[in-house]
Amino acid sequence: MTRIVLVLGDQLSRGLSSLRDLDPAHDIVLMAELAEETTYVRHHKQKIALILSAMRHFAAGLRAEGIRVDYIALDDPANTGSFTKEVARAIPRHRPERIIVTEPGEWRVLQMIEGWEAQFGLPVEIREDDRFLCSLAEFRQWAAPRKTLRMEYFYRDMRRRTGFLMQGDDPVGGQWNFDSQNRKALPTGLRPPPRRPKPPDAITQAVLDLVARRFPDTFGDLLPFRWAVTRHGALEALDRFVALSLPLFGEYQDAMAEGEPFLFHALLSPYLNIGLLTAHEVCRAAERAYHMGDAPLNAVEGFIRQIIGWREYVRGIYWMKMPDYARTNALHADRPLPWFYWTGDTAMRCMAQTITDTRRNAYAHHIQRLMVTGNFALLAGIRPAEVEEWYLAVYADAFDWVELPNTHGMVLWADGGMLASKPYAASGAYIDRMSDYCRRCAYDPRIRTGPRACPFNFLYWDFLMRNRPQLAGNPRLALSWRNLDRISPQEQTRIRDQARAFLDAPGTTAPAPEHPDLFG
């Protein structure tokens, strides 16, 4: 009897649980490019192109194996644009005895799929997504006895479970975390390895043409398109990262530099999140480089921590706490998202550079996301839902399960400290220390108030004053409170007034002061 196996756009793994017992003689793989998935937020053009091209290449690979694939293209005139309606259309075509799908990565999609059995009168089998190294049941078991769910302790358990960078029961190098060695600014003259995209093949070119026609007004530049769209291409990207970038990734993973949007970062997260790579093989490749003497321990540990620590951890938090998690707003942030998040048109050079890089590449690395665009959103008190929608839209690796906890908890502290023990609030001094953005900025990171004051400075102190009732008992902010109390009442009033005037200005930005010498 025929079974319909539905494969979603972020499930492009041949080892997917729903594909393992596929019977090519009887089963049908159903894949669909859907309007509702490309438009529910204003996805970056490159993100749409990446997923659609990868889907088409994956379908072609299945067909080459002799598997029957029912593929509905976005521009098919009969395409209804909806998961549910496309499954409903496929049922009379194939007359299946059941529908099989691997559990989706988004709460709203799971809710939809769970209603299909009653709607269609057919068994719907939802299989575990075991591409992750920690199952949802295992995460709940880990979380159950704990009052606080700190990632560091989860990460250590994952090291023990996977054996990555372990010597028996002990971590290689005698410590679990080498983050203190990974905070250097980029030295003058050090250039990251070049990223040379391959010309698009016929499938990708057709998708690029489709996206250009269908989504002319959505966010982001479509070209140049640098992303791999096949498993082979993703494996090549992994090999290049390990050989060329991993050795210096650790020391400079927090650095930011104008004209260097990628630095030594891997850019592998989109391939992990749509299924072209697995977490295990990525970590194994990095670990192998350490054991062969090709990459230092601080770089390899920092990279593996991002994969088996943060990535697995935020997925567990998402599925354990949704849907209520997304509704929390611990700091009562209520300002709208500033318009310059979409345009990059602001005199704050760090914000302009990060948003411009995001528009060009559908990418910004974790410090740009956390400590530039995220830090501003936190300090300004922007509504969590609007910030989360922006992050979900603009980055090629953003899917709800990974984007929402990172933004809601880590960036905005909207969950009241479940993910992060304190808000990641910082003044302009941090950005000045970790980047060269401030050198040509109209604002001065050394000035707290006045026309040339860096907005991150007065917004930082205003954030602390505004949120002191909610944060006063946080022990990790003790130094911040002592520093705040050293500021005179008159200066505190000036800070509040300047922050309010800045945030209330049209577009939530002030005109750039005239300092032509800063741009010479």
Image (cartoon, grey):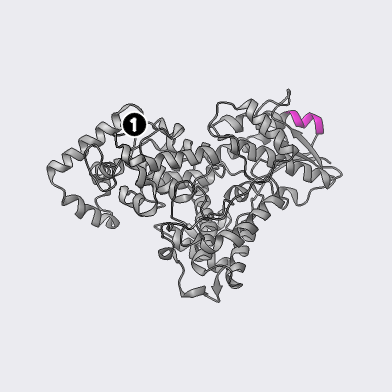
Q: Residue furthest right?
A: 25
Report the residue at 34% width, 33% height from top.
Answer: 334
**Label 1: few (<14), some or many (≥20) within 10 Å?**
some
Quarter-of-image position of residue 114: top right
Q: Nearer the viewer, residue 237 or 9?
A: 237
- Identify the residue position indicated by label 1 in the image: 508
Task: Name the amino acid type tagged 1.
Answer: Thr
- Residue 305 is situated, as x and y percent measured from the top left of the image, at 51, 61
Q: Nearer the viewer, residue 106 or 491?
A: 491
In the image, the segment drawn in magenta is 89-94
- Residue 156 is situated, as x and y percent measured from the top left of the image, at 49, 66
Quadrant for the C terminus, please.
top left
Q: Secondary structure at mark 1?
A: helix
Q: Nearer the viewer, residue 213 or 81?
A: 213
Instruction: Relative to 138, say whether 28 is above or below.
Output: above
- The main secondary structure of the magenta stretch is helix
Residue 73 visible somewhere in the drawing: yes
- Residue 296 is situated, as x and y percent measured from the top left of the image, at 52, 69
Instruction: Relative to 396, say whether 278 is above or below.
Output: below
Q: Residue furthest bottom?
A: 168
Q: Is residue 450 left or right of residue 418?
A: left
- Residue 514 is situated, as x and y percent measured from the top left of the image, at 29, 34
Whether 3 is among the magenta residues is no
Quarter-of-image position of residue 354: top left
Residue 16 visible somewhere in the drawing: no
Q: What count of labels does the image hold?
A: 1
Quadrant for the N terminus, please.
top right
Instruction: Relative to 515, say whether 306 is above or below.
Output: below
Report the residue at 25% width, 31% height from top.
Answer: 501
